[in-house]
Amino acid sequence: MVSERETQAAGDRVGESPCEQDPTVMTEGKELKNVSESQSPHESSEAATIQTSGSMFNVKVQMPGSDVLDIQVSPKELVQEIIQVLMEHEDSCHRTCFSLQHEGNVLDNFAELRSVEGLKDGSLLKVIEEPYTIREARIHIRHFRDLLKNLDPTDAYNGVDCSSLSFLSVLSEGDIADRTCHENNGKKKKRSFTEQELESIDCSPPDYILPGCAERPLAPLQPLNADCKPLQCLKALMMSGWNPPPGNRKMHGDLMYLSVFTMEDHHIHITASNRGFYINQSTDDIFNPKPANPSHLCHSLVELLGLISPAFKKNFTALQKKRIHRHPLERIATPFQTYTWTAPSTNHIMDYVRAEDVYTSRLGYEEHIPGHTRDWNEELQTTKELPHDSSTDQLLRERATFKIHSDFVAASTRGAMAVVDGNVMAINPGEEVKMQMFIWNNIFFSFSFDVRDHYKELGGDEAAHVAAGHDLKGVQAYSSLDIEDLYVLGTVVLDYRGHRVTAQSIIPGILDRKEDQGVMYGSIDFGKTVSSDAKYLALLQKASKPLRIQKHSVLNEKDEPVVLCSSVECKGIVGNDGRYYILDLLRTFPPDLNFLALDKEEVPEECRKLQFPRTYQHKLCCLRPELVESFVQHKYTQFMNLVMDRTHDIGTFGENNLSKDGEREEVNIIRDVCREVGSVSDVVFDLRFNPDVCSSVVKFPESEKEANQLQRRLLKEASAFLLSVQIPNFIKECLHYGTVPLDGATLTEALHAHGINIRYLGAVAVVLEQSADGHLLDHIYRIVVGEIVTRSAKKILRRYLQGTEMSALSAAASHFLNCFVSSYPNPVAHLPPDELVSRRRKGKRRLRSTESADATVWSSLTPLELWKQIKTESSHSFHFSFICDGMDQLVEKFKLQKVSLLRELCMKTGIQILLREYNFESRHKPAFTEEDVLNMFPVVKHSHIKSKEATRVFQTAQANIQQGNLKDGVVLLNEALTLLNNVYGAMHPDVGLCLRLLGKLKFILGDVAAALDIQQKTVIMTERMLGYEHANTIQEYILLALYCFANGQLPVSLKLLYRARYLMLLIAGEDHPTMAILDSNIGVVLQAVLEWDLALRFLEKALETSTKYHGARSLQVALSHHLVALVYTSKVEFRSAMQHEKETYTIYKTLLGDSHERTKESTAFLKHVTQQAVNLQRTINEIYKNGSSATIPQVQIMPPEPATLLEQLNLINSIALINARDKEPEKDTKGKPGPVEHKPNVNRVQSGETAPRQPLIDREAAGESTNAEHNDQGADCSQSSTAASTMHCTEPHLS
């Protein structure tokens, strides 16, 4: 477990440079990050204070024992922040129960320092040790255990306590930014190498990342530190069997007893009293609570154990030095748990504190104690009701909301796992297992099965499964609108062991009512009986416009019209707290007619071409909100064009008419155009959808007939729009490298950004097959096919796991993986040993199985049978057929990688496997055994809390950057970073996005050291929040390597690029356009360390990849030819250098013209190489003729300067630096170089068009898109017309 104090400490460092402390920046991350769980939202919001800039001053803190620490603080900081800094400090980290006093007065932990009377620069604060209580003693023991286990990654492997993995410090062998300072005596200067030092650098890449290597080892995925062996301070620390203290000892202050085994094999018993800790005279057999002789009373366990165990003192000191040297972002907890799909083999050590922790709080026993249960619904709704008029109130509200939401997600995850594992008693135990419901920790849990035939006509269990996800989207939509007096439930959807579980907060009083009681709005039987309410209608009408929901009437069971402003499934229930709740929001968005085969309906031509509409596994297919918004924008453009055309047509006629007639004519035009485009209003453009229009159960009055016809027409147009516009736009963006997916997650994100559902993967694959530029999209096609395969396999595995007993999980999962990726033809399933099967239960009905089939049905699965099921599933789910006989043929035909398929399946199903090398191709032995499946984690989906003010400031910063006001952009990004820290804490994907852009700006403005420090934090945050092998992590590694190179850290730069290439090979393979960028980076850095042959291998591979994906006459290929020519020049192979540079010159001349700067530079370089070649040949000829006395001028061979290579790296990564005179672009930007990234292609360079604006994408789950790093290379750095706009569009958005 990670201390909340460390969270604060890392927050302090988010805006702080390791060598230079900027007072303005130091205050950015300083605030109380985590609100105590025992506080109510009101208490937490009143206690927390949003930090702003203020004058800094120093205070002295006197520790017990006369140690004095100097701390720099701000007047607006809280006293609690000083306490947290002290608990992070190496000398005081072992203290927990203390207070601060100033001039004899105890300071309030939640008071601002400016409110402390008499506190000024140089004031002395005293640390006063406070008496312990049982609670404080337990906190101290837990904190002590955390200090001992701080460097142990076991919690991260097991996915507990929000621990996660980061390997940047292992790769770089320490803090990159700190090393910069130490190497330059505390000053941030670029390091330069002598030629001898360059030759001594070990830059040999591992064989498995060399171009052309087919080996894909798994072991390097989690590199080990050189000193990874943990330091053991104690052999055992446990709760004594003499607990609890008897009454007479309580009267003496005893709180609890501990039993400790030291490294010297001494067994001691310790008493925790209100005065501190001391050794007593008890043994395992005799209770003697009297103090031992000599008596050591210490206020902390560390002090006490340091007195009696020299080994503890030595090892604990060394352990804390290592802990302090780790980057704070590596130590703090993440707001949501990140799981890893691989883990090494670890020794399970004895830990009594962990054991007690598991069997109390983790199983929820303490949550069932009256008075100790958190009322999640009350907390969630109370934070919604907090004031938000001022920006400070808004931030306080968002912070409290995010904190409680993250706690709710964590509690829901633990509860759902306990429910599926059978550790929670059902509230209806007499029902069938599928129908059982559970309450744990005041959270309601239910399985996503069709329990009462509610979804019988919609698809049964399959419809119930997707309904949970649709409901979560509806919760996200309504909660984002933040409508006053309208409440939604806290909702989390989890997939675990084949089950989908929905966790919801509980409406007060709902468990005391029958199902049909209390529903004031909506229907409980999908439209057969319907009710409405004026209050609910008024509230839902506020949401209807932003959500594009049409107000409509339906008939109830008495054939009476009832007005609704949502789908009929949406239920409105007034809780006992008087709040108006809505739930069952599964039809918030309009239906997708492409997957609803309606009778007697005319299908648009665009749909018929792609064989739509199609039948599907369920009838709950809905359009995505992104598609709805894109379609509305499309119709609005159509509306404006029609109005302008018709107004122009009558313009000359109207000039001779009276103004009133002209106005009347314009009104008529607008009315006609509104009807033509499908607007629900005749006066203004207003496009809305009726979510019930395609329901087979809902009945409509006659008055709705015309409106329903209009709605069906709109839905047909929207469905055709998806096929005819959005899918081609996605393909076009991939073709122009505006979107470059690396794996299934980034592909899903890109499709969703265009409003394309995953069920359209088959249609996307067909369009890719039929595309004239299909060979340029091979990488996209491979990812699409791999995603279809793994998603089909996931559905099959889900069905198998639902009927699998707990004892057979490892066997079932390993057998399925063998059938999926192993070439072994006849894998045999290993059933649990018979001696472990209870005879008493033999023949009885299994209690936990949710399937009626045999629990061992998975054991009869064969690779051939699995492949048949995958083909069937892909045909039903994606309408895509594989013309293959098995997985091996599939992998060979589509050039897939088995390790990539394995990674995708494990991440989609939550399977964790042992980190070792697997032989998938062996036909004599299966790849997996039971012991290779280590764990199974839940896949968690939840809504995302966005900071409105931070998003606004971030977008303003982007606008300033677009206009060239870079310094203003830096100021605004720092402000956005402060706001994000206040809401989310130090760790959040949005914080990472803000840091990334800030670091890039710093680099562009020439502050390389600051960019390096910021990008280091970005990499750690991305690794820990999104995953150490996530596609975004690769992009962050590339940027960090660039900054390291610019800062003179060549070995570190190479290691980072090698790591990025390994991750690329693992998740996407070598045949990918991103690999060209990576190989070009590696080749240039290898040139800098004088490794010409290695550099040539990588650069020639980059040239080959660029030629395939960009064409032989593209700017990317021109740059690749130039880089190869540079290497050949250094190798004194001028003929080859001339050949490649001639290609560069030809391409630049054709695309950019003779007068372009790049063409001129290529001409000059070509002349230089030609002259050198002539000189070399003359020298050789003269030597042959006259011997060594030749007088011909010698060949001038100079390796490229670091500045030249840095320029090439910037071109490769589409970044342009500005000169010092250009750092004030807002004063005079005319004719100056563009300040930021470029995104050119041939068409744009020729026409001078600016880059299109990047679609707004929610980056919470998948992080930033990969656009920036896949822009076309070799751009003209002097094109200032597009420079500012391209950086804006290539950077991500927070909303």
Image: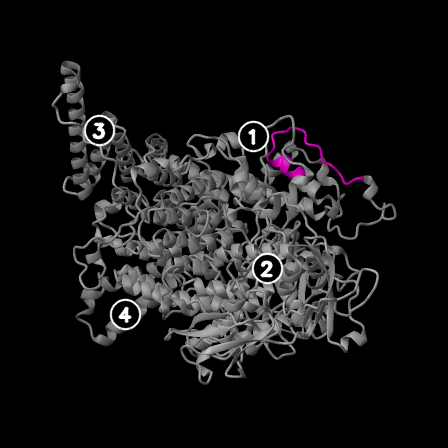
The residue that disc 1 covers is 888
- Please, which residue is most extreme toward the top here? 1185
The residue that disc 4 covers is 665
Give the residue type that dot 4 points to.
Glu
Q: Quadrant of residue 1153?
A: top left
The residue that disc 2 covers is 147
Residue at image location 44% in from the left, 52% down from the top? 175
Eye-nearest disc, 2 or 4: 2
The residue that disc 3 covers is 1138
Tag 3 or tag 1, which sits nearer the N-term? 1
Eye-nearest disc, 3 or 4: 3
1139 lies above or below 699: above
Residue at image location 78% in from the left, 67% down from the top? 243
How far apart are labels 3 and 2 at the CA level?
62 Å
- In this picture, which residue range is highlighted in magenta? 814-833
Give the residue type that dot 3 points to.
Met
- Which residue is more in the foreground, 975 or 926? 975
Q: Is residue 424 left or right of residue 584?
A: right
Which SS class for mark 1? Answer: helix
Using the rendered image of the protein, determine whether residue 818 is visible from the camera's viewpoint: yes
